[in-house]
């Protein structure tokens, strides 16, 4: 992306034109500059969506075939693209790339399922790990699902202001995030023993550790 492009002929009355389209029954509305929105969407779809798809195509799992674009709540217009990996009907990874004219951010979520008979000490080792202190994983219990009785959710996000090498940095980061989350799921698919938890966490630290 590097240098931000802005049309010199941008319609100065875009606010008025967009305001004409809003639902007047609502108490709060958001106005978005359509030219900026279209520009950010082009960056997400043309530059980064092919990179995401190329990473997914090499996996054995189903993935979202259509890009999901939306606006994020922010002080400036920010558009995001969300992508997911599935094992059957179950999502185990969700990623999101967010872009504004000034900065970008990559968010990732991994959903670790563990059966009811998995050694509970594994949960304690993961949840109490000191390297997650700044952004600890969370635990959910589903008493109706024996095989997915426990679910530990990992979340992380990081980003930067746009710079000359940002596009390459984003592509490299997307590839790394997807690769590591695939490794996490492959390692944990049959559960995690107490002896294996250290090796699992070594994989996790590639994306999710927080000091």
Image (cartoon, grey):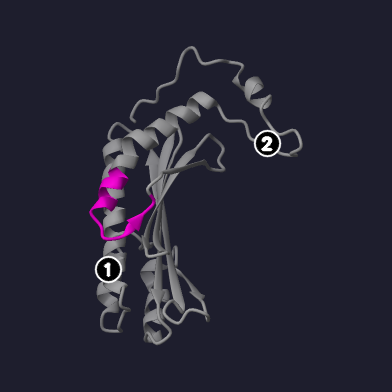
Q: Quadrant of residue 126?
A: bottom left
The residue indicated by pointer 1 is 186
Q: Is residue 52 part of the magenta span, yes or no?
A: yes
Please tell me the numbered disc located at residue 29: 2
Q: Is residue 125 something that shows in the picture? A: yes
Q: CA distance from mark 1 to mark 2?
A: 44 Å
Depicted 7 relative to depicted 41: above or below: above
Query: Percent position (x, y) of residue 52?
Result: 31, 46
Identify the secondary structure beneath mark 1.
helix
Name the side, left or right, on which 32 lies relative to 64. Answer: right
Residue 163 x, y percent position in the rendering: 33, 33
Query: The magenta stretch spans which residues?
Result: 51-64
Q: Earlier in the sequence, mark 1 or mark 2?
A: 2
Q: Is residue 104 above or below residue 63?
A: above
From the viewer's perspective, tell me whether residue 58 is left or right of residue 79: left
Which residue is rendered at x = 33% and y = 39% of the image? Answer: 48
Q: Nearer the viewer, mark 1 or mark 2?
A: 1
Towards the viewer: 80 or 86? 86
Quadrant housing residue 110: bottom left
């Amino acid at each position: 992306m590097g240098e931000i492009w802005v049309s010199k002929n941008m319609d100065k009355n875009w606010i008025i034109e967009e305001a004409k389209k809003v639902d007047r029954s609502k108490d709060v509305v958001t106005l978005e500059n359509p030219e900026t929105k279209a520009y950010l969407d082009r960056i997400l779809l043309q530059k980064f969506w092919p990179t995401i798809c190329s990473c997914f195509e090499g996996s054995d799992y189903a993935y979202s075939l259509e890009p999901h674009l939306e606006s994020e709540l922010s002080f400036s217009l920010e558009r995001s693209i969300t992508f997911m990996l599935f094992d059957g009907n179950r999502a185990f990874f969700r990623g999101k790339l967010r872009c504004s004219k000034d900065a970008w951010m990559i968010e990732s979520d991994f959903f670790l399922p563990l059966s009811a008979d998995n050694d509970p000490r594994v949960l304690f080792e993961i949840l109490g790990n000191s390297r997650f202190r700044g952004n600890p994983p969370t635990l959910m219990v589903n008493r109706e699902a024996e095989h997915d009785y426990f679910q530990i959710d990992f979340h992380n996000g990081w980003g930067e202001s746009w710079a000359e090498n940002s596009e390459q940095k984003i592509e490299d980061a997307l590839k790394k995030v997807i690769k590591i989350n695939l490794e996490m799921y492959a390692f944990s698919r049959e559960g995690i023993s107490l002896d294996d938890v250290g090796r699992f966490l070594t994989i996790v630290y590639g994306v999710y550790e927080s000091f």
